[in-house]
Image: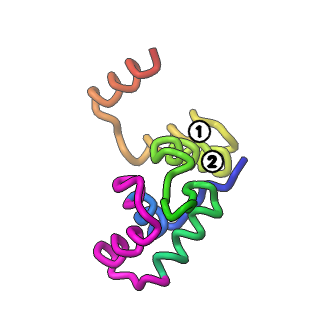
Amino acid sequence: MADFKIGSAEAGFADLIWENESVTSGQPAKLGAEKFHWKKTTCFTVLKRLCERGLFQNAGGVVTSLISREEFYARHSEQYVEETFGGSLPAFLTAFSSRKKLSDKEIDDLKTSWI
């Protein structure tokens, strides 16, 4: 399984790219400077890391995603459950719901989404 763990700063920057896709290779630096007050070099370093992790590609002066935001977070969640709960979704849900109770609407939504 590929490693889909990234830090919150990288995740925020990735979200920024997904929201503005497709962008020229200079636009992520401009967006990162505006939203996070990062230097241009920081933006390019984070973009390079995200490309190396297989989330984006920077080819021909255009940054595009190799994986959708939804697919990334689904795989990220799967990896977390695998590593933390031995792949057991019931163990994860038990741990999660022991601290946060689901509303009747949330329970109904879960039931209907599995049908």
Bounds of the magenta span? Answer: 16-41
| Lateral position of residue 79 relative to residue 69, left or right | right
Residue nearer the viewer, 94 or 113 = 113
From what the image shows, is residue 31 above or below residue 63?
Answer: below
Residue nearer the viewer, 73 or 93 = 73
Magenta stretch holds residue 70: no
Amino acid type, callout 1: Ala
Residue 56, given in percent of the width and then of the height, sits at: 55, 56
Q: Considering only order in the chain, which callout, 1 or 2, is on the residue closer to the N terminus?
A: 2
Secondary structure beneath label 2: helix
> Which of the 4 image quarters holds residue 32?
bottom left
**Residue located beneath label 2 in the image:** 79
**Residue located beneath label 1 in the image:** 91
Magenta stretch holds residue 28: yes
- Rounded to the nearest angstrom, the CA distance separating label 2 from label 1 is 14 Å
Residue nearer the viewer, 25 or 88 = 25
